[in-house]
């Protein structure tokens, strides 16, 4: 039973990490809507998760970056 609990906890942390990492990648690539969606999903699934501080830092970064609309394509 203890082994299952550890495995379950490891899977949960891995799922948290995947969401946070994907959100940070999206944010650094300028995909703000995607980053926001992933961070909201993390908050919904892991409201008191182990990576809450990382989520809050990413949300702060999201809020602090100016929203810019790319110019229209000349094509």
Image: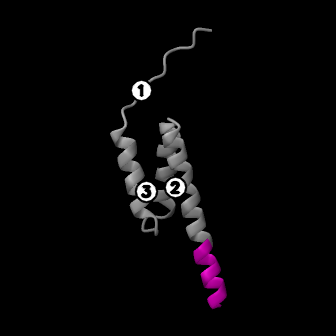
- Left or right position of 24 against 66: right
- Report x, y in % for residue 71: 49, 16
Quadrant housing the N terminus: bottom right
For residue 19, which quarter of the picture? Answer: bottom right
Label 3 belongs to which residue? 55
Q: Is residue 60 left or right of residue 39?
A: left
Question: Which of the two labelled residues, at mark 1 and mark 2, occupies the earlier sequence position?
Answer: 2
Residue at image point 48% right, 64% down: 46
Where are the magenta residues, as a range? 1-10
Pointer 2 local density, CA inside 10 Å: few below 14, some 14–19, many at least 20: many
Residue that numbered label 1 is attached to: 68
Residue 5 belongs to the span the image colors magenta? yes
Q: Residue at x 56, y 50 (%)?
A: 22
User: Gap between marks 1 and 2, in whole Å?
Assistant: 23 Å
Q: Residue furthest top?
A: 74
**Cα distance between the residues tagged 3 and 1:** 22 Å
Question: Where residue 50 sits: x, y (%)?
Answer: 46, 69
- Say above or below: 49 vs 31: below
Q: Main secondary structure of the magenta part?
A: helix
Q: Quadrant of the C terminus?
A: top right
Label 2 sits on a secondary structure element that is helix
Instruction: Mark 2 and mark 3 in contact? Answer it, CB < 8 Å.
Output: yes
Q: Residues within 10 Å of mark 3 (few under 14, many from 20)?
A: many
Q: Which mark is residue 50?
A: none
Q: Which residue appears farthest toward the bottom when viewing the image?
A: 1
């Amino acid at each position: 039973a203890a082994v299952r609990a550890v495995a379950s906890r490891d899977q949960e942390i891995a799922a948290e990490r995947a969401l946070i990492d994907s959100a940070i990648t999206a944010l650094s690539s300028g995909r703000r809507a995607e980053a926001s969606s992933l961070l909201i999903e993390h908050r919904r699934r892991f409201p008191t998760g182990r990576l809450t501080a990382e989520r809050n830092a990413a949300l702060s970064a999201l809020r602090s970056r100016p929203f810019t609309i790319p110019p229209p394509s000349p094509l």
